[in-house]
Image (tube, rainbow, N blue to C red):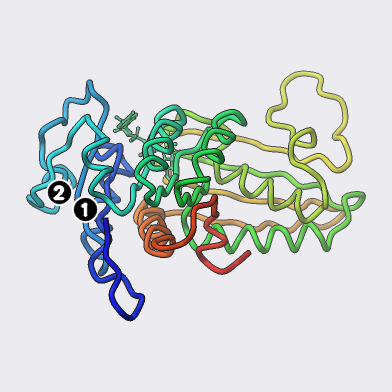
Amino acid sequence: MSETSATGKPASDMGLVVVGAAGRMGQTLVRAIHTIPGARVIGAVERADSPHLGKDAGELAGIGIINVPISDDPLPVFAKADGVLDFTTPASSVEFAGYAAQARIVHVIGTTGCSAEDNAKIAAAARHATIVKSGNMSLGVNLLAVLVEQAARALDADDFDIEILEMHHKHKVDAPSGTALLLGEAAAAGRGIALAGNDVRSRDGHTGVRKTGSIGFATLRGGSVVGDHSVILAGTGERITLSHHAEDRAIFARGAVKAALWARGKKPGLYSMRDVLGLS
Ligand code: NAD
C-alpha cells in the first residue's frame, strides 16, 4: 500500500494491477501506465484458462519486459496494490469489486454491459473501495455527455426526438454500448426523466409511430471501429447531431489511469468519470 509524505502528497508511484491484462484494453492500459508519471504496473491478472498466464505483461503489450508476470490469482497482487484497472466482464468486475473492498484500494471499472444487479453489488463494494465506474473513460465523451444534457434540456420533447446511434468493432459483445447508455442517461437527465422505461433499444417489424419523449438506440457492429457515437436531436425541419469518434483505445486507458490517480486517497464511494474530470 502507498505511503503519504509530510506534505500530504503520495510519497511513491501508485502501484496498479491490470486485470484482463491480455485483452484489447488490458494491453492498452499496460502501455498507457508505462508513459504516465506517478503510476506503475505492479500486477497483471488474467482468466485461469488464459493462454497468456506466466507471460510478462509488458512484453505482451509490446513495451518490453517489465518483470510483471500475468497471474490468475488476484488476491496476492491486490494485497500489495494501490489500485486496480478493470476492463473485463460484468461477472469478473463484480468479483474484483469485492476483492478491492477487502483490500480497501481504488478500483477503476471500465467494463460495460453490467446489469442492475451487477451495479447494485458494485455499489455495495463501494462502501469500502474507492470505485470509479464509467461506460467511457475519455474526456471527449464525458464532455459530450454534458453537451447532450444541455441540449436535451433546451429542446422540448414535443419538438425534438432523441436518437443515439453507435458503431463498434465486430468483437464487441454487449449492445447498446456503455457509452450509448451513458449518453442516453445524460439525455434523460436533461429531460428530467429516467432512461429506464423511456428507452427504445431496438425496432423491428410494425412498431407503430414513435412515442413522444422516448430515447431511441441503434447499434452497428463491424470491422475494427474503436467507437463512434452520435446523438441526434431531430425536430421538424431541422436536426442537430452531436458526435464523438474514438480513433485509439489509448484515450480510454489514459482516462482510466487519470481516474486511478484522482481516486487515490479519496474516501470510499462510487464515483464517475464526470467527477474525475470536474464536469459533474
Ligand atoms: P477483451 O475481450 O479484448 O478483453 C477482456 C479481457 O478480460 C480478456 O483478455 C479476458 O480474458 C479477460 N478476463 C475476463 N474475465 C476475467 C477474469 N475473471 N479475470 C481476469 N481476466 C479476465 O475486451 P476489451 O475490448 O478489452 O473490452 C473489455 C471491456 O471494456 C468491455 O466491457 C468493453 O465494452 C469495455 N470498454 C470500456 C471502455 C470505457 O472507456 N469504459 C472502453 C473500451 C472498452
Q: Which disc number belongs to residue 41?
A: 1
- Residue hosting label 2: 58
Q: Residue visible at 72% across and 44% down?
A: 163
Say which of 193 and 24 sits in front: 193
Position of 55 compared to 73: left or right? left
Which amino acid, by three-letter code, is at mark 1?
Answer: Val
Indicate left or right for 168 with 201 as reference.
left
On screen, residue 93 versus residue 25, left or right, reads right
Q: Which amino acid does label 2 sit on?
A: Gly
CB-based contact (under 8 Å), mark 2 and mark 1? yes
Q: Regarding ligand 1, which quadrant of the image does it lie in?
A: top left
Taking the spot 48% from the left edge, 52% from the top edge, the residue there is 132
**Which element carries disc 2, helix, strand or loop?**
helix
**Outermost residue toward the right in this view:** 158
Q: Where is residue 123 in the image (x, y as percent from the top left)?
A: 56, 41
Q: Is residue 136 above or below residue 207?
A: below
Q: What element carries label 1?
A: strand
Residue at 51% of width from left, 45% of height from top? 126
Q: Quadrant of the N terminus?
A: bottom left
Picture layout, residue 129 above or below residue 122? below
In the image, is the residue at mark 2 within 8 Å of ligand 1 by its beta carbon?
no
Q: Position of residue 65 (x, y in %)?
A: 7, 50
Residue 135, horizontal then vertical, whole percent:
52, 46
> On screen, 201 above or below 101?
above
Q: Distance between the residues labelled 2 and 1?
A: 9 Å
Depth check: 176 or 255 in front?
Answer: 255
Q: Is residue 57 left or right of residue 92?
A: left
